[in-house]
Amino acid sequence: MPKTVSKPNKPTSKKQSNTKSVDNKLDITVKPRHRLPDVWQLTKTSLIILCRYRWVFIGIILIYGIFDVVVVQGLRGGLNVTSLNQQLSGLLHGRYKQISSGYTVYALLLLSAGTNSSGSGGGYGYQLIAVIMVSLAIIWALRTSSNSVKIRVRDAYYKGMYPIIPFFGIFLLIGLELLPMLAGIYLYVTAINNSIAVTFFEQAGFALLALALSALTVFWLSSSIFALYIVTLPDMTPFKALRSAKELVRKRRWPIILRLFYLPLAMLIVSSTVLLPFIIFVAPAAQWIFLVLSLVFLAIAHSYIYNLYRELLE
């Protein structure tokens, strides 16, 4: 009988060939795209990972918290929650003045986390460096824990720091992508406060402009935020990470935006619910509770986004 000669297997479609190229870029197996898990599943998975390696993540954020209290807060100063609460309670009137003043102080605490209240740039610069370093340590711990390898706090800060330059490049790009949204909000607030927009249509026009600029920022961030995790892979450059991130979110940008939008919304609801009683009844402890929540939410945010990133790869 004649022998049958087997032919080598070839890619059946251009799509499979593209999948392999993306696989080489990300240095990890990329499977056919599937339906993304909902926000509850992502939250559950993120919390399970943090709880499983809780002592490692507690050690990582504890080192950052000590640095923040000793160095950053010492240079920037902090809000006097008790004094602010008393002043606002005296200015506000009505049945719900305590709740109104509490939410106002809460908003000021949020603003103080991203601004320099002492007037010197040293505190903010040190905080930026500390956030980058603790983020790299958390990302290293998350990636290593997914491989079921024993991890230590020391290794997270030692071994996780090697991609700090490309990571800072992506971090800087994200800061630039926030500019359209900030510009839109600034134009809207300026137009309202200075009576530039008086009529309803004028105010609606500035509101639509702010909304359009904010939508542009959200569109950019929905892909570039994953570049923060891709750029920590070996032999990865910022430009390659950005291209890989765009490929990950291709044709799935809207469900990704919804899952990303859930994260800050949930954090705002939880933090305001926890902090408001402290601001009203135990004001001196409010700033310390705010610091603890900030540390915990930083780890949760990275775990949530990293798990979403892993789901995009499957």
Image (cartoon, rainbow, N blue to C red):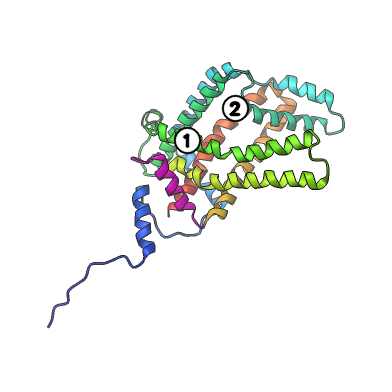
Quadrant assignment for the C terminus: bottom left
Crowd around label 1: few <14 · some 14–19 · many ≥20 (10 Å): few
Secondary structure mostly seen in the magenta stretch? helix
Left or right of 22 in this view: 127: right
SS at mark 2 in the image: helix
Q: Which residue is mark 2?
A: 291
Residue shown at the point (79%, 25%) measured from the top left: 88
Magenta region includes residue 260: no
Residue shown at the point (44%, 35%) measured from the top left: 167
Q: Residue furthest bottom?
A: 1
Indicate the position of residue 222 as horizontal and vertical percent values.
54, 47
User: Which residue is nearer to you in this view: 132 or 279?
Assistant: 132
Residue shown at the point (63%, 44%) measured from the top left: 214
Quadrant assignment for the N terminus: bottom left
Indicate the position of residue 185 as horizontal and vertical percent values.
68, 38
Q: Which mark is residue 54?
A: 1
Disc tally is 2
User: Which residue is nearer to you in this view: 95 or 20?
Assistant: 20
Q: What's the distance in space between the residues labelled 2 and 1, CA to CA? A: 18 Å
Earlier-in-chain disc, 2 versus 1: 1
Task: Provide the residue span drawn in magenta.
Answer: 232-251
User: Which residue is nearer to you in this view: 292 or 221?
Assistant: 221
